[in-house]
Amino acid sequence: MRHSIYFILITALLLASTHIFGQEKFDGEYRLYTKFRGEKECLEGNQASSKVKSGAAFMDKKQNVSGQIWKIVPVKDGYYRLKTKFRGKDECLECNEAGSKVHNGAAFMDKCQNVSGQLWKIIPAGNGYYKLKTMFRGEEEALEGNEAGSTVHGGAAFMDKDKNVSGQLWKIEKLNKDFVPRVDKGSSSTWSFGYGKIGGDFKAMSKNGEKNNITSIYASDTWHGVHRNNGDSDVPMSAGLVFKPKKTVMHPGNGAEHLTKIRFTAPEDGQYAVSVEWKAIDEQAQNIGTAVYTNAKGVEGKTDSSIQSGYKVIHKKLVSKVNSTSTYKASLKLKKGEIIQFEVGNAGDAYFDDALETKIRLVKL
């Protein structure tokens, strides 16, 4: 049985109720648009020796070409390198001094090296847009997308004085969109946290709190909910239970109507790679129920009288000892608004020792 100190510690961690919203971190493949040119044109990385735009990077019609697929690679101190699928891992986007004779003073792809012109900062500019600046040109200059037919820098993208112009406002669209639930960011139109009976039953958890690096969303009792350790070190609880850094933990309540649930609502039609792994982290763990339900019409599953009408189970497994796992991976076709629901319950033997480290990720393919 969980020692009472466990509940006391959880309660103490939740005295504050302010969420910590993390700043977005870029790491993956993207398309880069400007407000000026709209979503029909993308920044394209060029071969330095090309006669097109004197080898500089430029805005071009959005199309399925590798020069428009950008990999944003974190470096250090908030800087990134910008690479294209076309030029590969060994070339980076480099800013230029406007008066330079190299590539008409425009930005260009060059061999990745330890130069400040290849170190980019991505700075929020409001309404989903960003400014792109470099260590070389400093805070006073920003990358500007150009009209291809312009005589300014041969129509290529260039560094100019930071000002309020639409060509310097960049929209960064991630390819293969990742969806990961984050307790510290709270519920949204895509992710929500709740409880209820098995299947489609869902009541939103209405309480939340954050203290000592643990953020929680919970029902009436602090331990009945979803928790995340936002810190960089372990948070020991009791009886061997430890919340690991940057990990999410689900814990069910007591009774058949108090399963803990994380719900994904598809934001758009498409094929989604779905994966979840639950791992028992209580030293005394025994009999914890895990399941995945959906109401997606195009997904096959099992139904019975205990499941809400329209829902079906697509994964179900009992976790019975510490470090044992329950995993599910599938590629599912979803319509906008259809639901995938991840649930954990006490399996009918009370709610002690039922903490599950939880990793959920969906990728729109």
Image (spheres, helix red, strand yellow):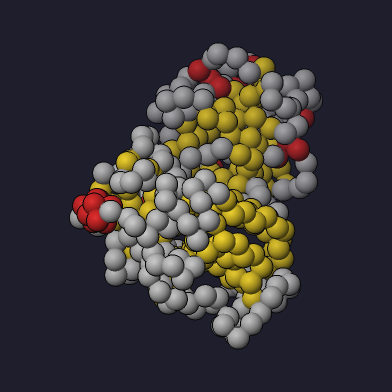
Foreground of the two, 178 or 95 = 178
Quarter holding the C terminus is bottom right
Residue 334 in the image: state x and y as whole percent: 68, 68
Residue 161 in the image: state x and y as whole percent: 45, 31
From the viewer's perspective, tell me whether residue 245 is left or right of residue 359.
left
User: Which residue is drawn at the image coordinates 61% and 39% (left, top)?
Assistant: 28
Relative vertical location of residue 58 with respect to residue 170 in this rendering, above or below: above
Residue 229 in the image: state x and y as whole percent: 37, 45
- Where on the picture, by quarter, is residue 88? top right
How many discs mark residues in the rendered view?
Answer: 0
User: Which residue is drawn at the image coordinates 63% and 24% (left, top)?
Assistant: 92
Relative vertical location of residue 298 with respect to residue 122 in this rendering, above or below: below
From the viewer's perspective, tell me whether residue 300 is left or right of residue 11.
right
User: Which residue is drawn at the image coordinates 44% and 67% (left, top)?
Assistant: 349
Residue 46 in the image: state x and y as whole percent: 73, 29
On the question of residue 297 being in view, the answer is: yes
Foreground of the two, 7 or 55 = 7
User: Which residue is drawn at the image coordinates 33% and 68% (left, top)?
Assistant: 219
